[in-house]
Amino acid sequence: MNHRQHKQLSRRKFLGQASCAAVGSTAFLSSVLNLSMINTAAARPHVIGSPDNYKAIVCVLLAGGADSHNILVPRGQTEFQNYQNIRGDLALPEMYVNEDGNQVPFFHEINPTNTSRQFGLHRGMANVKSLFDDGNAAFVANIGTLVEPVLNNTQVYNETMRLPLGLYSHADQIMQWQTSVPQDRNALGVGGRMADMLKEMNTIDEISMCISLDGKNRFQSGNSVVEYAISNDPDPSKLGIEPINPHFNDAGLLTDVRNRAINNIVEQSYANIFQDTYADLTQQSIEAVNIFKQALEKKPSIPTVFSDTTLSQDMRMIADVISAQCNLGANRQIFFTTFGGWDHHDEVINAQQGMLPVLDNALGEFYSALKDLKRENDVTVMTISDFGRTLTSNGNGSDHAWGGNSIVMGGALQGQRVLGEYPDLTLNNDLNLDERGRMIPTTSVDELYADIALWFGVSPNDLDYVLPNLNNFYAYDPNNSPLGLFS
């Protein structure tokens, strides 16, 4: 691990733990000051769900803009030649020399059932290849943020269609993938809006439907729901909240003073609604800590062994929380984590050679753990990223672009398919915006999210709240979902 990677991981770990349901953290305080949080102080009716109807969504953000054109590669003779021509020094080789000194294919060949086109996966994605072949994984090709359909580059040049704000900006696009409202920089998150609609399916108010392994995020921010952030520490007593949560069993004057101060906050009745809300949420956070610890202490063991990477350990913790869902009163859960470092303006091939196996192992291990729990049909995983990358090289890397490819995984999928429209990888293409090979997406993130939301239990009547732009791409039809992921 180089210095830059170490610095990123250390900062990520710090930010994640610093906002882990912390009473008094900056992230927590900023949530309280959001007017939408006032709603959480009101009493709410509850719908008692069935443990047999459990479902979960796991969103893995590949932060930085992953060059997914080197993850899913066309393998037809002409298409592969086009891929090599346009990618130049970024093109992956057809063959490589293995450890035994033999020439072997670089790609894992996959055979989608919904198209005659041939594709290959980067050789670092062996687990995803197996999941794909077994029908438990699919790809969504040339997907991206869209306000409305953009059919060709002429519409962009003539400015006849609305485009996302800050199209190639990390800050804008990473936010818009999480909100699916690319014309607004202040929108709520897709996961948060889903949780707004379904929160009554869970029976313990203190535990949010949205659980984050990466601190605060936009994806899980709703009108009446915010994320509950935890760490990936396997010890239930170390969820990243110990420095702030009261230590009632500790001795010493400082601990006594701290505990009295916190109890004083939560026991008083405040006339001011902001203070009252803060006190209520403080008490809920303390109670949630205890509920979470007790639930994880009672969780069943999971035989699958996870790799010692941050992402694998995040996925292990998600599996642990899923295994404890009955004790958490959860019939629906939405998880979020981030695997960063994908902004490869340099060393695309070498960087992905190290990073893709980390992603692949984490996904493979997580699916194995779901099978241990007999929950593989109840959980859907998706990868998202800021944007795709340019097809052409800048000399040794690729730059910010638009459309890219996403992975979806889960036992409920009708997998082994490449959904959407994988574009011709040439510059002479109506979807290409310039000489760098920036592709207009042919599938909107709304369509992916709508398929998953309907599977998750969101009512068709609530789709316009969860996905305000969806009607620009899809009109609800019970016999025809946007992408057909689950049919």
Image (spheres, rainbow, N blue to C red):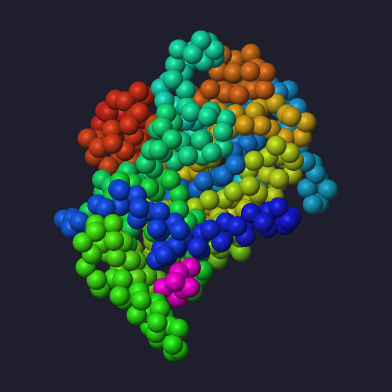
Q: What is the residue that sits farthest to the bottom in this orientation?
A: 251
Task: Using the rendered image of the protein, determine whether residue 326 is visible from the camera's viewpoint.
Answer: no
- Does residue 2 belong to the magenta stretch? no
Q: What is the residue that sits farthest to the front in this orientation?
A: 271
Give the vertical position of 329 relative to 247 (above or below): above
Image coords of residue 56 (percent x, y): 37, 52
Task: Using the rendered image of the protein, determine whether residue 425 is visible from the camera's viewpoint.
Answer: yes
Image coords of residue 73 (percent x, y): 63, 32
Main secondary structure of the magenta stretch:
loop
Q: Image quadrant for the N terminus?
A: bottom right
Highlighted magenta segment, given as a residue range:
236-245
Give the vertical position of 164 relative to 224 (above or below): above
User: Is residue 284 or residue 267 the one in the foreground?
Assistant: 267
Residue drawn 51% across and 25% down? 441
Residue drawn 34% across and 80% down? 260
Q: Image quadrant for the C terminus?
A: top left
Residue drawn 70% across and 37% down? 345
Q: What is the residue that sits farthest to the left in this orientation?
A: 45
The answer to whether residue 100 is left or right of residue 307 is right
User: Is residue 113 or residue 345 the one in the foreground?
Assistant: 345
The answer to whether residue 455 is left or right of residue 76 is left
- Does residue 238 belong to the magenta stretch? yes
Give the vertical position of 471 relative to 199 (above or below): above
Residue drawn 55% across and 18% down? 431
User: Is residue 44 or residue 46 the one in the foreground?
Assistant: 44
Q: Quadrant of residue 102?
A: top right
Give the vertical position of 109 relative to 211 (above or below): above
Image coords of residue 420 (percent x, y): 47, 28
